[in-house]
Image (cartoon, helix red, strand yellow):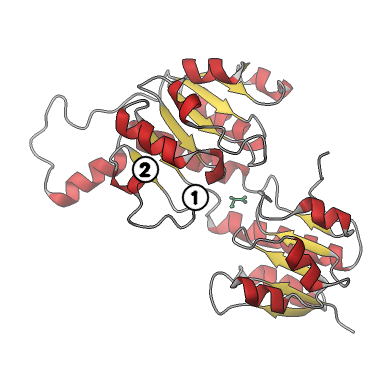
Amino acid sequence: MQSAVLVTAPIPQPALDTLRAADLDVRHYVAGPVMARDELLAQVRGVAGIYCLINDRIDGPVLDAAGPSLRVVSTMSVGYDHVDVRACAARGIAVGNTPGVLTETTADLALALLLATARRIPEAVASVHNGTWGAWKAEWMTGRDLFGGTVGIVGMGRIGQAVARRLVGFGCRLIYSGPAPKPEADALGAAFVPLPQLLAESDFVTLHCPLNAQTMHLINGATLAQMKPTAILINTTRGGVVDQDALYAALRAGTIAAAGLDVTTPEPLPPDHPLLTLPNCVVLPHIGSATIATRTRMAQMAAQNLIAGVRREPLPFAVIMRA
Ligand code: DGY
């Protein structure tokens, strides 16, 4: 008998083809981009694998609803804060994600946000459309140089390093913080410093740490106050790393100069959210990994993880639970 798997959302066709070729009974939810919670709880019943996206909260109740047949949870994302890894481990359910494949694409987007905020690109584009572009003026639409600036990288993992590699070309001074120094950072000329020093010295602070209990609201009223009033904050990791109310207050008060966010709380951010009223806040709709090639590779990796898990084989890209 074929094992049933639930795919919770539309995904790139090549990954679906991979799943179907693996002789699985693929239950594919295509009625919308996100399954409602009660629908998810109903549809997981009896499946051997769940293929999910970052929108799906895969927690104890979902695992219980699936029952003892469930062997694997495979998320089409590198981040897995939406999956209760501990609850999966306790039930012997493997968890897979998609590390590495989206590193360069996400780093490109972090650079795009750095430049968009530093050079006020959205404001400048808007001026072309709304008629406020007048004669060339000496001090109109002036921004800040990324070139030569000090960039503080919070979290020197794969994506942090990829961002650092790009910034070497911009002549930036690089400093970073995290749980421990990274040998790979030496070749990039990046110096490990405590977070307070990073915040105090950086012209740009870019966040690349995962969201977990230690990093939740790492950037808050107190840490924002340690930054330079001319500094720019970039977040391409998870919205929860930043206390958004504190950020709004800091951007309004001039505690920091600007922010560029690819991730927010919640997602999508309501169009009437206060952050969207600020000219010095550039918000993108969580598109860090959104290139056709990268999303297709992520989808295929997640399919490989799902198939391996259903077959009780080691996952090619397994989430390792840290103590
Ligand atoms: C991830 O993979 O965790 C990103 O946030 C979405 O690509």
Rate crowding at label 1 as few (under 14), some (14 to 19) or many (20 or more) other CA atoms within 10 Å: some
Can the viewer see residue 196 in this picture?
yes
> Which residue in the protein does label 1 denote?
265
Choose the circle earlier in sequence order: 1 or 2.
1
Residue 125 position in % (x across, y down): 25, 45
Q: Quadrant of residue 44?
A: bottom right
Q: Which numbered circle lies on residue 282?
A: 2
Q: Residue furthest bottom?
A: 1
**Residue 7 versus residue 290: which sits nearer the camera?**
7
Q: Name the spot of residue 167 as percent of width and height, x first.
A: 51, 26
Q: Indicate left or right for 232 with 11 as reference.
A: left
Tell me the quadrant of the picture where the C terminus can be found: top right
From the viewer's side, name the closer residue of 136 and 254.
254
Marks 1/2 in contact by CB < 8 Å: the verdict is no
Amino acid type, label 1: Thr
* Residue 140 percent coordinates (x, y): 17, 30
The tag on residue 251 is none
